[in-house]
Image (tube, rainbow, N blue to C red):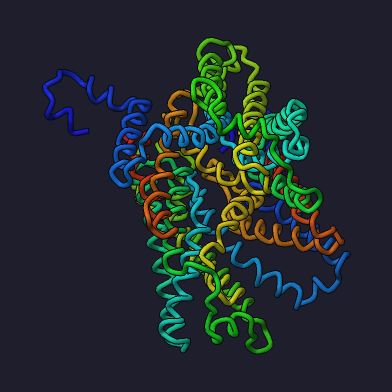
Amino acid sequence: MSATETTPVKGPSVLAVLRQPLLVAVLLIGVLLAFGEALSPGFASGEQILRLLVVASLLGLVAAGQNLVILAGREGIDLSVGGIVSLSAIVAGNVMQGQDASIPLAILACVATGALFGFLNGVGVTVMRIPPLVMTLGMLGVLQGLLVVIRQGIPSGKAAPALADFVARPFLFGLPGTIWLWVAVGLFMAFLLRRTVFGQRVYAIGSNEHAAFMAGVPVKRMRVAVFTFSGIFAAIAGFCLLGYSGSSFSNVGEQYMVPSIIAVVFGGTPLAGGKGGYTGTMAGAVLLTILQSILTTVNIDESGRQMIYGATLLVLMLFYGRGRRMRG
Amino acid sequence: MTAVVATKPAGRLKRVFERYPFLPALVIFIVLLALNGVFSPASLSARGLTGLLSTYLALMLLAVGQTFVVYASDIDFSNGAILSLVNVVIIVFMEQMGGSGLTVTMALAVGIGVGLACGLVNGIVVAALRLQAVVATFATSIFFTGLALYVLPVAGTPAPRLFWRTYGGRFFEIPFVVFAALAIALIVYLLVRTRLVTRLLAVGDDAQAAYQSGLPVTLIRIGGYALSGVFAALAAFCVTGDTASGDPLVGAKMTLFGVAAVVLGGTALSGGFGTVVGSALGAFIIGLINALVYFVGTPSQWQNLVQGLVILIALMLGIMVSRRARA
């Protein structure tokens, strides 16, 4: 940030531009890729980057719903996404049973599962006015219990060959289907947030719920909708994850809870909501995935990996949304 | 705090509730205790209650520490990781130095120091560097877990005999955990009367107003995190006494239960309002729910689901009752 002192550009423009979360994320992605390439040549090769993007797209899908919930404010957060990813992957796997013909039905069952639990979260938060953190925390406990029941009752399902191909094999112009799906979700989110009344209302209730209510925004319905969206996006991620790993085992989704929140923050959406967007979150998801990938490339213990990961996250957070200094 | 509606006469119930915000938790606690007694009379015996106490004392301490952070409208998602770290540090320390009374005491001092240091790190990161509490403490928890894995890569090293014999033992026919709980109660009783805790509540109620009236807001918030770290260390001692071994991941699952206990106890996550007693009751409510689900004969694979559902319902009830009572 000391660049402003040395460059002869007038005004705060350079600083302002450098503070753009999306730009920060893209720059950091470049730095990390270069760093990864230096550590292990071939890290930033085209094939490898494609593989990274497939992994990032799964996180990005979960983060899309998380993003909507956080944008809509009132301390919006969804701690239950991991449980929904796991559960929907199991539902999809069991409906599918490795049969291509059952894919449409599996999609339906999987998305319905996610939508149901997201909807329940939304109802708890609005009708019963439970804080989102508490509601989704409680829901996470319920989902984890449900996973135990399911794991002992039915065998883990299998992905259909077509789904596995869609997720990991080149699908169109050399890019796997998940990446195309992610691009589609990115366009959908951009359209939703910028061009629709729904999007305007998400920002409105996120920045000032009371004012939005006075202006006639159906605040409760909106909030139920964003939580339902979060459940649906988590379910879609669970569906793709099933294709990615071949079969569904019970806790596959757990690893997505914290990263989905951090990806949103790295994308420039503060946890207070009301501003930000999904483009940054996509960059945030890529950034996190590259970071994790570098750490698995480097030959160090799990302990060192975790320490570096945690410390790096903290350092990267310094680039984003720091709270305002107290003033008298 | 919520605005008092002028048209409603301040009822007696409301006044009682404002003074004792943990009342709903107390009612839930008593009901659960009674239900436990109905389904398993032995669970209400001195032996049964001691067992419950020795298992859930750690969660209670974690919840109490979290309460101080929540008072200031912050949150600490890393106290379970701090618990794990302290657990493995003292286990390895005692293994290296031998299990004599002196080393055990030294190990406890080291443990407190580690907890305090972790708490200070959290406080500095959240309050001084002004990072968002939720994600910043997620990040520090990853870091602390890494440290714990470094100290002890796999679970297993046993605690010295002296350590777990003391924790599980009796003095003058009274179980040690009862003394431990009383000592902790005394410490907490004195602690909540300190200026720091009052100031944490002031910061949580209105940070801007607190700052403008000259309070060192940043230092106060760091103090809250430091308390949480120290209580996580105390919780680690209980876990070590209970399990008699080291496990670098032992606290991971406890963090969220601790937060649930705070909420069950009637403390507002928005800060500025709550009680430590409530959080302690909240931890025992979770323990009693787990015990009850077992006693009523729930098939083992359904236990987690029923526990999760009952905890969710208790959380909802607690929040709705306390809102009604306060409004």
Q: Nearer the viewer, residue B190 or A265?
A: A265
Residue at point 60% right, 78% down?
Answer: B179
| Image position, residue A224 (x, y; %) | 67, 26
Image quadrant holding the C terminus of chain A, namely: top left
Quadrant position of residue A30: top left
Residue at position x 72%, y 28% from top? Answer: A107
Q: Is residue B125 above or below residue B91?
A: above
Residue A323 located left or right of residue B183: left
Q: Is residue B218 visible?
A: yes
Tell me where residue B141 appears, x and y as whole percent. Answer: 46, 53
| Residue drawn at the location 64% of the way across and 48% of the way down | A251
- Report x, y in % for residue A22: 37, 26
Residue A252, image x, y percentages: 62, 46
Which quarter of the rendered picture does the N terminus of chain A lie within? Answer: top left
Compare residues A108 and B307 and report the one nearer the observer.
A108
Side of B222 where A146 appears, left or right? right
Q: Is residue B38 left or right of residue B208?
A: right
